[in-house]
């Protein structure tokens, strides 16, 4: 039995996110926030069948596939700029398992990253981030995009092998793209100032969990296959928004 997410009306989004540190929008509300026709985001779903394996999993697993891209958004100008491809880097304080190393992943598919819908989505969420942080909308926001597929190749897949964590950013958006023949994958959100928390399962494609990363920690539980063939997967698009620059070593790394 799974618990449904506590959905937020789009008109209450800012108040909910500011007050509780999290909000969940259904697919229609996310499309409306981005100013897109309902269902347009779903055109990207086939791209998750073309994600390369993650070669950096320290637990030796084969269950994660992903890509990565970086952008700078100026919400007030409605401008999105793709950045030269770079490593994904997190400090050990935020990712004890994979932090402190430069992880190079293949870039995003241009059918997604160069589409007008992509710009609309990132600009809308960057404007939300600016309101959440009280930052002027003409300030640039640094966005990292991570399409993930977690599968049950080894019998179990771990969406968050690092455990409950923060990402060291201002706003996190976890968009569910698909759930296929799996159980598990429950989302858990905890207030980092005390024991308060909640759990639920994102099930609707293109619904989104929004997190004030300064306020809450989050994780997703492992997934297991439903069928005897052992095949199943969970696809997500994780977007992180940060003012003041990308996370990275003191000396910028390029390749």
Image (spheres, rainbow, N blue to C red):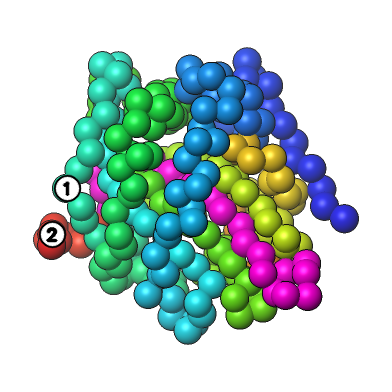
- Residues in magenta, as a range: 224-247
Q: Which mark is residue 108?
A: none
Report the residue that reaches farthest toward the right.
1
Distance CA(mark 2)–CA(mark 1):
8 Å
* Residue 45 magenta-highlighted: no
For disc 2, the neighbor class at 10 Å (few under 14, some 14 to 19, many from 20) is few
243 relative to 189, above or below: above
Taking depth in this image into account, of 50 and 64 the one nearest to the observer is 50
Residue assigned mark 1 = 84
Label 1: how many Cα within 10 Å (few below 14, some 14–19, many 20+): few
The disc at residue 254 is: 2
| Camera sees residue 221 | no
Q: Residue at x 49, y 68 (%)?
A: 64
Residue 173 visible in rendering: yes
Whether tag 2 and tag 1 are in contact, CB under 8 A, the answer is: yes
52 w.r.t. 128: above or below:
below
């Amino acid at each position: 039995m799974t618990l449904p997410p506590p959905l937020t009306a789009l008109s209450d989004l800012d108040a909910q996110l500011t007050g509780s540190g999290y909000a969940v929008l259904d697919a229609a509300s996310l499309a409306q926030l981005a100013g897109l026709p309902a269902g347009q985001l779903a055109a990207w779903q086939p791209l998750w069948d073309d994600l390369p394996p993650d070669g950096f999993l320290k637990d030796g697993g084969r269950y994660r596939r992903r890509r990565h891209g970086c952008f700078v958004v100026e919400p007030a100008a409605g401008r999105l700029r793709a950045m030269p491809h770079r490593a994904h880097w997190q400090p050990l304080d935020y990712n004890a398992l994979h932090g402190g190393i430069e992880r190079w992943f293949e870039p995003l598919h241009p059918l997604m990253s160069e589409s007008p819908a992509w710009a609309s989505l990132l600009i809308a969420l960057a404007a939300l981030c600016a309101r959440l942080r009280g930052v002027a909308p003409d300030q640039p926001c640094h966005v990292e995009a991570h399409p993930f597929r977690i599968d049950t190749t080894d019998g179990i897949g771990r969406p968050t092998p690092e455990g409950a964590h923060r990402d060291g950013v201002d706003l996190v958006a976890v968009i569910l793209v698909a759930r296929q023949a799996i159980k598990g994958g429950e989302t858990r959100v905890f207030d980092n100032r005390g024991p308060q928390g909640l759990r639920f399962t994102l099930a609707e494609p293109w619904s989104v969990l929004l997190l004030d990363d300064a306020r809450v920690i989050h994780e997703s539980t492992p997934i297991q296959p439903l069928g005897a063939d052992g095949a199943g997967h969970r696809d997500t698009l994780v977007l992180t928004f940060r003012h003041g620059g990308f996370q990275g070593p003191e000396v910028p790394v390029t390749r």
